[in-house]
Image (cartoon, rainbow, N blue to C red):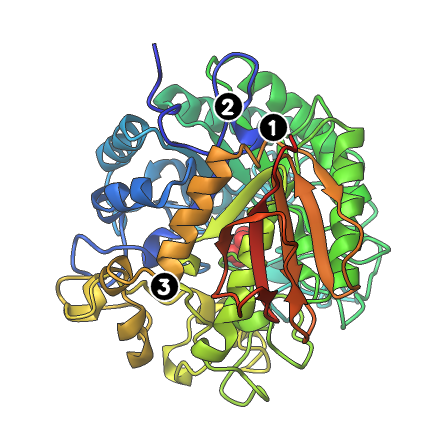
């Protein structure tokens, strides 16, 4: 009997196949996807309504960003109840419907789990605030006495990733200034103490809660950050690279060896369940060799390849990161997990054409020099996507990239909502520009995002022409390109294939074979001659005669090779 997963998808499933090794996983950032309730924030019912369109696109699975109960201080990455749905997104029943319908369409769902920190509104944190220093309630988080005569200075110099100090001082029950608690992100996001057995047990319970409901796995937020150096040594990050992590010499709050014990433990929880459930880590580390540590056989199944995401549009750099990634992941038996965009980075349509550096998380604003138009940036973005989707392994897509959406760098200041913007007093724009609600129908209010026309971030007028309904009718649109790429990727089993570099092309061309498919990504400025013996399967933009233009990726079928 065939399962709904076998029908048209690119991931190979069934006996002997683990779907996550080759799956194309589409990130739904629910607040910006589709708003069924009309309040201007997307929701679960909205996501359910759009499943046929995702099936048509040809994805295998969805990563659903947080929808749990939350005061939304960091767009849901501040969770107050890990086992319920926030009313702005719907109810648990809405979640169950989404999951059941996705499964009926042959689409798996992994949910976002945020274990590094909770919301300050979580009952445990409230209990900690109402308890005395040293109490079991305080010990679930990282409370410390301050330094200085009156404890008026924070315990150390750590800075929040969103800006400002990583410590906030509380008032004790008697009204006196009290201890400080650690928050690597916003002050509304206190960090758990992962040496605490109660914390470990609680997250095992949370994993089982969602696994029992039938989820196919988890994307694990800040997977490199749960365990801190117990001595809490002072640390000043390198300003140029500091963000979510990824410095050559890791911060004392990232990449601590004991963090791996957490995932070994979780792996055993997942293995209690049938159906091939997967863990995917969000670990910002400095090299693919380090990334591979997260996907050793008894740990997670996938980890985002952020070094690939951060690579510039440069043939030598791309060849190097692809080679090193495949080697490093093969060493531990894990698949590559390629990604170009998500809700924390400048959309790759824009990013790959920027001339100036823009560290992750900083974002770009109206004053950023030389931001390309959507039209100008599209060819390179589509070439990058066509390259990524030809690589063996799993690939993540971020909602809206299939429409070729660009970064909304020109959001008005008063619309911005990212805590980064507030905590840096506007020095960093943050991530709102990649989170603007999607355009679905050109002639509907809020371009079909919400029937009431409300939208929690304003959509640019230029997105009217990017609306999905127009792109469905246009054979040359980014949407049609993504659909065709995904279909061919499935047909030629590229996700489950192997990569062999193809010699004989100029340095500016990333050229490789994956099974019967020859991939040529022209990263140079000069057009490149097509090989005469191959049949063109698809090109990310029209070829010029028998040449591959600049910023173009072509997939060719080689005769007689397998
Ligand atoms: C990583 C998430 O992707 C990001 O959006 C969030 O702000 C931080 N972790 C904190 O949870």
User: Where 411 falls versus 382 (above or below)?
Assistant: below
User: Mark 1 — residue?
Assistant: 200
Q: Quadrant of ligand 1?
A: bottom right
Q: SS at mark 1?
A: helix
**Foreground: 321 or 117?**
321
User: Mark 3 — residue?
Assistant: 476
- Distance of mark 1 from mark 2, alpha carbons? 20 Å
Earlier residue among tags 1 and 3 = 1
User: Mark 2 — residue?
Assistant: 277
Residue 203 appears in the rendering: yes
Q: SS at mark 3?
A: loop
Q: Residue at left 36%, top 57%?
A: 479
User: Where 418 falls versus 373 (above or below)?
Assistant: above
| Residue 489 location (% of width, % of height) | 50, 40
Q: Quadrant of residue 210?
A: top left
Question: From the viewer's perspective, is 137 left or right of 490?
Answer: right
Q: Residue at left 27%, top 50%?
A: 43
User: Where 401 falls versus 211 (above or below)?
Assistant: below
| Numbered marks: total | 3
Q: Which quadrant, please, contains the C terminus?
A: top right
- Distance of mark 1 from mark 3, alpha carbons? 50 Å
User: Where 479 falls versus 258 (above or below)?
Assistant: below
Question: From the viewer's perspective, is 6 left or right of 561?
Answer: left
Question: From the viewer's perspective, is 228 left or right of 474?
Answer: right
């Amino acid at each position: 009997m065939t399962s709904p997963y076998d029908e048209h998808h690119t991931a190979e499933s069934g006996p002997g196949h683990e779907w996550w090794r080759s799956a194309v996983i589409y990130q739904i950032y629910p607040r910006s996807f589709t708003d069924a309730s009309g309040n201007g924030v997307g929701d679960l019912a909205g996501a359910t309504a759009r499943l046929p369109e995702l099936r048509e696109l040809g994805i295998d699975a969805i990563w659903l960003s947080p929808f749990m109960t939350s005061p939304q201080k960091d767009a849901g990455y501040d969770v107050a109840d890990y086992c319920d749905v926030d009313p702005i997104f719907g109810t648990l029943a809405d979640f169950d419907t989404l999951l059941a319908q996705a499964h009926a369409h042959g689409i798996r769902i992994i949910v976002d789990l945020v274990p590094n920190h909770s919301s300050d509104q979580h009952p445990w944190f409230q209990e900690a605030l109402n308890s005395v220093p040293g109490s079991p309630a305080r010990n679930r988080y990282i409370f410390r006495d301050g330094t200085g005569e009156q404890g008026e200075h924070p315990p150390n110099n750590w800075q929040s990733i969103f800006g400002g100090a990583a410590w906030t001082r509380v008032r004790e029950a008697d009204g006196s200034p009290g201890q400080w608690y650690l928050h690597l992100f916003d002050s509304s996001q206190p960090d758990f103490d992962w040496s605490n057995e109660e914390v470990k047990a609680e997250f095992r319970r949370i994993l089982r809660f969602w696994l029992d409901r039938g989820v196919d796995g988890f994307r694990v937020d800040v997977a490199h950050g749960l365990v801190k150096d117990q001595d809490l040594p002072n640390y000043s990050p390198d300003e140029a690279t500091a963000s979510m992590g990824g410095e050559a010499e890791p911060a004392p709050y990232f990449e601590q060896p004991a963090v791996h014990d957490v995932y070994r433990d979780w792996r055993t929880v997942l293995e209690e369940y049938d159906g091939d459930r997967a863990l995917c880590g969000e670990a910002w580390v400095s090299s693919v060799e380090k990334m591979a540590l997260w996907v050793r056989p008894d740990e997670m199944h996938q980890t985002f390849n952020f070094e690939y995401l951060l690579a510039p549009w440069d043939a030598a750099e791309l060849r190097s990161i692809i080679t090193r990634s495949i080697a490093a992941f093969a060493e531990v038996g894990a698949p590559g997990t390629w990604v170009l965009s998500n809700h924390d980075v400048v959309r790759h349509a824009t990013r790959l054409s920027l001339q100036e550096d823009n560290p992750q998380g900083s974002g770009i604003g109206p004053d950023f020099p030389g931001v390309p138009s959507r039209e100008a940036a599209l060819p390179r973005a589509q070439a990058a996507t066509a390259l990524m989707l030809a690589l063996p392994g799993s690939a993540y897509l971020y909602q809206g990239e299939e429409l070729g959406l660009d970064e909304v760098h020109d959001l008005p200041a008063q619309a911005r909502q990212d805590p980064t913007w507030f905590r840096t007093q506007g020095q960093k724009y943050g991530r709102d520009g990649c989170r603007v609600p999607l355009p679905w129908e050109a002639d509907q209010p809020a371009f079909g995002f919400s029937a009431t026309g409300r939208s929690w971030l304003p959509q640019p007028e230029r997105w009217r022409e990017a609306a999905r309904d127009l792109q469905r009718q246009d054979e040359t649109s980014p949407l049609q390109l993504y659909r065709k790429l995904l279909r061919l990727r499935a047909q030629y089993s590229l996700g489950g294939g192997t990569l062999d570099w193809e010699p004989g092309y100029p340095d500016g061309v990333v050229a490789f074979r994956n099974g019967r498919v020859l991939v040529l990504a022209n990263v140079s400025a000069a057009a490149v001659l097509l090989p005469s013996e191959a049949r063109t399967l698809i090109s990310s933009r029209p070829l010029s005669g028998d040449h591959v233009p600049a910023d173009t990726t072509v997939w060719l079928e080689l005769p007689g090779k397998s």
